[in-house]
Image: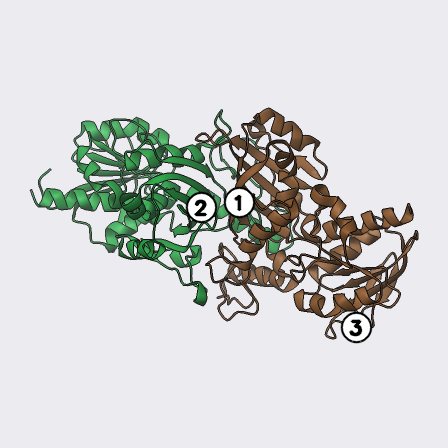
Chain colours: A green, B brown
């Protein structure tokens, strides 16, 4: 590229993540030359405002990417699988927010706070990890560097927005039905494409994405595999339980980590306080800890409830919260785009 | 006692747990001679129906227990501390649902499925464990017996009803405010007696009860200490993260357990299917697993999502759900009362 302004395409411009990507490009004044909003045929024609202008969303196709420098994909794995190779063929760098290429050995899987250098190893596509993985590895990175991580046992408390706009609508509809005394029927969650539906309002559903043959869900296996790939360390053992709860924005995670060495809790507190992209909120005396409602709308990863496992000198409990649509998706993607843009501008 | 009908007192008759105790005594046709409903001065005078009769709630005092055989306490720790000794003085057996006597070495802490025999070791008071502990140990008992348990790492998803009727009202009020577009203010949760309040609607609050000096909450430490006491085994290591979520009835728990021996997953499935008071709901292919909305109103503990930790041959993940007001409180207490009554009747 070697330029200072970029032609940018947003694929999935009308989705929950796409909307946040557009808002971030606007707010952060991303150096844009031409901007293109793409979507499925169903949403094409929608008008989306950007810096006071109305941009009409176009249907995404193999030839939508002529002249595009950076393409941000968040329209589902099938769309990425089909169209990202065409974008690459047209010379674009794709930042893909879906599961399509994450475990592809030729595709870097990047959380800038952890493995920023991988961005420049790309062969056209850079994968954005799964939301629940991103916030966990961003918070654990300083611990990994200082002490090493032997294993992670994580239980998640995930917001419905991770399942898209229709899941947000579903929680709102069910809640309204129940508040107003009507019987409510589930229609979307836990997994839109599967036959069995469960109520999410006033419930906790221990299924996110489809079950694999080993009894884990795909979401749980993403946390296992992506963590190893991002740390580039197969020795990090991970076991996960992923649960959807009636929260709209912000995933919370109860993370148990066993470090490879003895640690000093005050030192960990300081490492986290100094870590880029991480905000330490850990003041039990004043009942301060990360909360989904506080994290919503913010780019950082919030960490608190730090305490030693009383039964294991190397065990540590943490509570990690972040806005799943921002650091967990749109912000991590735009952050990667900004790093690419800065590098090109400095060439 | 040695009788077939019993004089029963319910202390805290108008509270969330008291209401369920009364309903269970009614439904299960508990062998009652005289029945007395007691409460604080504030609720005294309320009329509560029982088998078609209206019973007026009386203010509880030191002399309320004359002639009482079985007193079921669920009016808070302070009331139990003050009045249970008076009930014992009058010859009653107290089944106490508060934290007042749980760790007292002279007081048995009983989950009938685990340590029923302890009931008959009482010196006047039998403690009902904390809701989050009861459902966990009831489900883990068959595993403990067969393989031994080295350690437990648990993260909870707890319903607001565990914090009493005012917390249910709070979630309902906040939800209605938000659904109807009003700003909502938290007033009760996480802990009524502490100054800082957090919104529970659309949130996950990692604080249940007060913080201890070690950084854990009292609820988390209850799970640690009570588990050891109920299994009568200090070698069972427990570390807990307790979280309140916007659910009204039913606690869910993500439990990671490391057994002392290698295990066979199918055998564990069979052990749980056969365990008293436990219902196995574990059919991922058909998206069947325990859910708070399904457990609400039922006495059993529901277990599912059984799967081996892929990184530890002795590690097992489970998802344990139960109605916190029933097996977690009222049902466990009435179950103990039934066992006492049956033993007396057979004398």
Name the side, left or right, on which B23 lies relative to A186.
right
Mark 2 vs mark 3, foreground winner is: 2
Q: Which residue is mark 3?
A: B62
Q: Are marks 2 and 3 on the same chain?
A: no
| Quadrant assignment, res A60 | top left
Name the residue nearer the viewer: B121 or A242: B121
**Chain of the residue displaying label 1:** B
The answer to which of B173 and A35 lies nearer the viewer is B173
Question: Which residue shows up at 72% across the image and 37% down it?
Answer: B276
Residue annotated with mark 1: B237
Q: CA distance from mark 3 to mark 1?
A: 40 Å
Q: Pointer 2: what residue?
A: A312
- Other residues around mark 2 within 10 Å, as few (<14) / some (14–19) / many (≥20): few
Q: Secondary structure at mark 2?
A: loop
The answer to whether one can see residue A59 in this image is no
A119 lies left or right of B145: left
Residue at the outermost bottom position: B41
What chain is tagged by disc 2?
A: A
Give the percent coordinates (x, y) of residue B116: 75, 45
């Amino acid at each position: 590229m070697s330029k200072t302004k970029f032609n940018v395409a947003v694929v999935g411009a009308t989705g929950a993540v796409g909307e946040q990507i557009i808002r971030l490009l606007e707010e952060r004044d991303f150096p844009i030359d031409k901007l293109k909003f793409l979507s499925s045929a169903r949403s094409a024609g929608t008008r989306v405002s950007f810096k006071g202008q109305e941009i009409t969303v176009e249907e995404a196709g193999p030839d939508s990417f002529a002249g595009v420098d950076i393409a941000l994909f968040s329209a589902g794995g099938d769309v990425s699988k089909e169209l990202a190779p065409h974008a690459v063929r047209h010379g674009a760098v794709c930042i893909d927010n879906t599961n399509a290429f994450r475990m592809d050995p030729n595709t870097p899987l990047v959380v800038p706070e952890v493995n920023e250098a991988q961005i420049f190893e790309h062969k056209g596509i850079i994968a954005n990890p799964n939301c629940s993985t991103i916030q966990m590895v961003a918070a654990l990175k300083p611990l990994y560097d200082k002490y090493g991580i032997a294993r992670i046992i994580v239980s998640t408390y995930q917001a419905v927005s991770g399942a898209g706009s229709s899941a947000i609508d579903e929680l709102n509809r069910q809640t309204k039905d129940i508040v107003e005394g009507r019987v409510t029927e589930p229609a979307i969650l836990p997994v839109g494409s599967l036959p069995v539906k469960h109520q999410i309002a006033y419930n906790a559903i221990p299924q996110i994405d489809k079950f694999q043959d080993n009894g884990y869900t795909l979401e749980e296996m993403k946390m296992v595999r992506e963590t190893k790939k991002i740390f580039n360390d197969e020795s990090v053992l991970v076991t996960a339980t992923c649960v959807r709860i009636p929260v709209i924005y912000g995933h919370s995670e109860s993370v148990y980590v066993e470090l490879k060495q003895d640690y000093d809790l005050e030192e960990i507190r300081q490492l986290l306080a100094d870590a880029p992209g991480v905000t330490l909120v850990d003041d039990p005396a004043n009942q301060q800890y990360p909360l989904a409602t506080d994290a919503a709308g913010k780019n950082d990863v919030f960490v608190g409830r730090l305490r030693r496992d009383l039964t294991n000198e190397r065990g540590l409990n943490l509570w990690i919260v972040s806005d799943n649509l921002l650091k967990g998706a749109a912000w991590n993607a735009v952050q990667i785009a900004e790093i690419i843009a800065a590098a090109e501008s400095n060439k």
